Amino acid sequence: MQLTEFPAPPVGAHAAGPAPARPRAIDSLVEGMALLRSPRRTVRTLVAESRLSIGVRLAGSASVWRDGAWAPLPRFTLTGLHCSSRTVCTEGGSVLALVHLHPAAAAMFGIDPERAAEGTWDLAGWWPASDLEALAQAMAQAPDDSTCVARLAHAVSDRLAAAEAPAPAIVEAVRRLREEAGGLRIATLAQALAMSVDTLERRFRATIGVSPKRFARAVRLRAAVLSYGAGMALTELAVGAGFYDQSHFIREMRLATGSTPQGLLRGQAIC
């Protein structure tokens, strides 16, 4: 599997050339782009993700393990943030373009954030199918991978620009929880944002789809997965990712994935 990542387009950039800068509150919701090529059939486990993703499959197919069977994934997908894990099988020859978004973007596509969380949906439910087909054709005709994913990112940004921007306080809450790798106390966060814990939790769930505490757990798990290296001790990995100790890490990993860190990190293809 070959994953090529690209930075988000600069503010004001446009696939067809320079354009008036969109509001920074909108552009900053696009957090990155990627192109995933799978020369061979690959089964991998994805452990937690604090972003929303828009995907366009340009070739091949993929399925997700759900309720004891493989369920085909749509060609155009909206994948919500995940606090748990999921197993995906990608067939050989597949090409998937991705745009990663701030988790507050779910409501801007007209989908209930709580419904989006932990799921992968057919994007055609919130985006005209004819527009998606035209976008996929333009992406397939791009001269290079960078232009291909940029065309997707600009199309996504155009749709976001037509929606109401999320509350700055919740965007800031997400930033702080990520910056602290999920180690920030929710009471401390609420105080910093000049609101009560109850208000923060209510507004956060309404915008992001999960509670601040659950989101923080996803951030910690993701940090652990990304920092894991062959031969690394679990204690070192746990503390570095913001867990209290190894036991805390093991409990959280088992809760999210159904497996221990030893079984998951050392025995499977993960990302």
Image: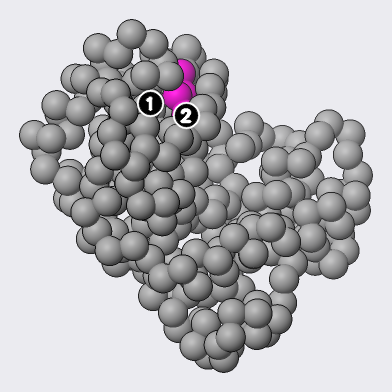
Of residue 16 and residue 115, the one placed in the foreground of this image is: 16
Q: Position of residue 230 (x, y in %)?
A: 83, 31
Q: Main secondary structure of the magenta part?
A: strand
Q: Residue at x 48, y 14 (%)?
A: 40
Residues rendered magenta in the picture: 33-37
Is 270 above or below relative to 206? Answer: above
Residue bearing mark 1: 149
Q: Residue at x 69, y 64 (%)?
A: 182
Question: Which class describes the residues within 10 Å of circle 2: few (<14), some (14-19), or many (20+)?
Answer: many
- For residue 252, say whether it is visible: no
Upstream in sequence: badge 2 or badge 1 = 2
- For residue 212, say whether it is visible: yes
Count of all numbered marks drawn on residues in the image: 2
The quadrant of the picture occupied by the C terminus is top right
User: Which numbered circle lies on residue 34?
Assistant: 2
Label 1 sits on a secondary structure element that is helix
Q: Position of residue 247 (x, y in %)?
A: 84, 64
**C-alpha gap between disc 2 and disc 1:** 7 Å
Question: Which class describes the residues within 10 Å of circle 1: few (<14), some (14-19), or many (20+)?
Answer: many
Q: Residue at x 54, y 50 (%)?
A: 49
Label 2 sits on a secondary structure element that is strand
Q: Is residue 36 on the magenta stretch? A: yes
**Residue type, mark 2 in image:** Ala
Of residue 128 and residue 244, the one placed in the foreground of this image is: 128
**Residue type, mark 1 in image:** Val
Q: Is residue 125 on the magenta stretch? A: no
Of residue 33 and residue 78, the one placed in the foreground of this image is: 33
Q: Is residue 85 left or right of residue 180?
A: left
